[in-house]
Amino acid sequence: MRVILADDATLLREGLARLLAEEGHEVLAAVGDAPSLLAEVDRHRPDVAVVDVRMPPTHTDDGLRAALEIRRRFPEVGVLVLSQYVEKRYAVELLTGDSARVGYLLKDRVVQVDEFLDALQRLADGGVAFDPEVVRRLLSTGDRDPLEALTPRERDVLDQMAQGRTNAGIAAGLHISQSAVEKHANAIFDKLDLPRATGYSRRVLAVLHYLESEGGE
Amino acid sequence: MRRWLWGLVGVAFGACTALLELVYVLCAALVLLWPRSRALAFRGARALVELERRRLAHYFGSSHADQPDGARALQYLALRGLVGLLGGVLLLLLGYGAVGSVVEFRELWTSPHPLEGRSSGEKFWLTVYLAVFCAVMGYLALAGLIGVSSLDRALARRFLEPDRAERLQRRVEELSVTRADVVAAIREERRRIERDLHDGVQQRLVALGLLIGRARRAGDGERTAELLAQAHQESQEVLRDFRDVAWRVYPAALDAGGLHPALEALAERAGMRVELHYAVESRPEIEIEAVAYFVVSEAVTNAAKHADARIVSIRVQREGRWLVAEISDDGAGGAVADGAGLSGLARRVAALDGRFTVDSPVGGPTVITAELPCA
């Protein structure tokens, strides 16, 4: 796939570029600050941009703001955000709106080369990739896995959701009515304790949680 | 002797200004009846106070820094005028006595008809009597003059300096500011440490992990060996970075040996030519040492990073009660005292009641001085 890297740490940027090249991907540009990232994305329209949150000019969350802008201006470009810490706020902002092709990983996760490459691949295929840590924080569940509270039927619905199907698609697939799917969906959201009033997609969160515990597709 | 004469001149001058002041106070008292002209009257009063302040500083070497408001200035001038007038009267007495006694003596010994029919024995006793009388009167007049000059200064202290409550209040205000500043400075330092850890050490660790990850994925043994060698090299870099950060957080040498070895280590690590002149006999308190160290460290970092300096010279010495650290470099200059790094230092120094100055004209050289009070 075609990738653009943005990280102000030269060493890490080079390391990632080498890794991706070794894996047969094409690194179109590797930049160290938010404005040049936007310029390069505009120029190349890569499949995925890998973006560090903390970058010049202000060293706060310039990278994240650039990532959100990329989502807005070039929806076809996937964005994988790397962050030093889990910042719930960042994850929420990324998940708001159209939440396909976004990813949010802890920076240290890059060290798990396989997982990192896998996340990139998932984004390129139109999916999402969120750090387990991020998901855990977003769902802020207790010790017990809320998925266990789901009925078999609800699990089926969630499984279909995770495959990216719409409610209509799920209804067709499971041979139930669309309103039943909606009812199941709401039950799922309630059991997973996903607040109704939040701005980000409860559906995505539910899917994330599911993927997390199922260990992938 | 010179100081005495100088003081006499001061009192004489004070007597002249006293006349002026008393006249002014009387006029001002009339003018004050019209509220509109009040400000003008007060302004004149303040100008006269300024004149007094200069006279006191010039002839008596006492400085009084406060600026009283208009009404208080007039009060001061009225009282001060009376004291000055007293001084003038005493001076006149002294002068009159001196001239009078000289005339008396001359009459006694040189006139052709001195006190008809006195014997020379009587003349002698008269002379002794007169001399004793003059000495006593002269002494009294001089004592009076000393009294006037100290009264003068007492008045100035009373009116031209903040009283105790006010001084305390100012001190409290000052302390609140420096305390808030110290908290801010510490927060700033912590932020810097966090950034050092993340942008330095952590990035290197992630890069190291990446190298090892790539080595594990590499198919052939040769490539793996090469990547591992790189990773090994990288791990040493991480360690060096880590040591540097730890040192920046707190130089352990400060605790062990004090300021001198800490500064020596700093000079060695600076990566440029640093000349250290350290001339302090006994170790200052640890708080003083720590602040002095951070001032020097920051100044050297700035010289290297922003000023492109080739040589930095560090002088640390005691001047009386003060520990003075002076850092000068031959760099480009143009450092601003309220920039991020330097203002933090200024706060740290202020918190110890020290003085901090930055002299950095564009084009250099830059001289940063911190003076810290030592017990």
Image (cartoon, rainbow, N blue to C red):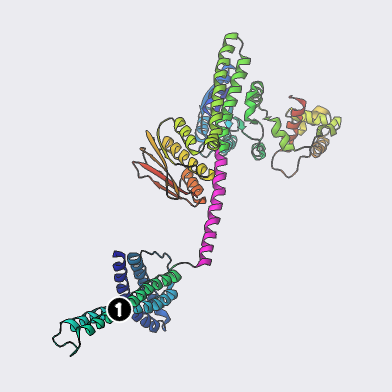
Q: Quadrant of residue B145?
A: bottom left
Choose top left, top right, bottom left or bottom right for residue B21.
bottom left
Few, some or many residues within 10 Å of mark 1 (<14, 14–19, 20+): few
Question: Over which residues does the magenta segment extend?
Answer: B163-192
Left or right of B282 in this view: A51: right
Spot occupied by residue B61 in the image (x, y as percentages of width and height): 36, 63
The residue that label 1 is drawn on is B132
Image coords of residue B221 (percent x, y):
60, 9
Q: Quadrant of the N terminus of chain A?
A: top right
Name the foreground residue: A185 vs B134.
Answer: B134
Indicate whether residue B6 is drawn in magenta: no
B14 w.r.t. B268: above or below:
below
Amino acid at the residue labelled 1: Val
Magenta segment main secondary structure = helix
Q: Is residue B161 left or right of residue A196?
A: left
Residue B322 at x, y percent in the picture? 45, 49
The extreme left residue here reads B112
Q: Is residue B320 left or right of residue A171?
A: left
Kindly identify which chain the residue marked by label 1 belongs to. B
Residue B68 shows in this picture: no
| Foreground pick, B14 / B305 | B14
- Quarter of the view holding residue B206: top right
Where disc 1 sits, the SS reads helix
Is B96 drawn above or below residue B213 in the view shown? below
- Residue B179 belongs to magenta span: yes
Q: In the image, what residue occupies the spot 29% across and 68% down?
A: B5
Outermost residue, top direction? Answer: B221
Identify the residue shown where x is 43% and y is 30%. Answer: B271
Residue farthest along the bottom direction in this orientation: B116
Position of the C terminus of chain A, as image quadrant, is top right
Q: x%, y% of residue B238?
A: 56, 25
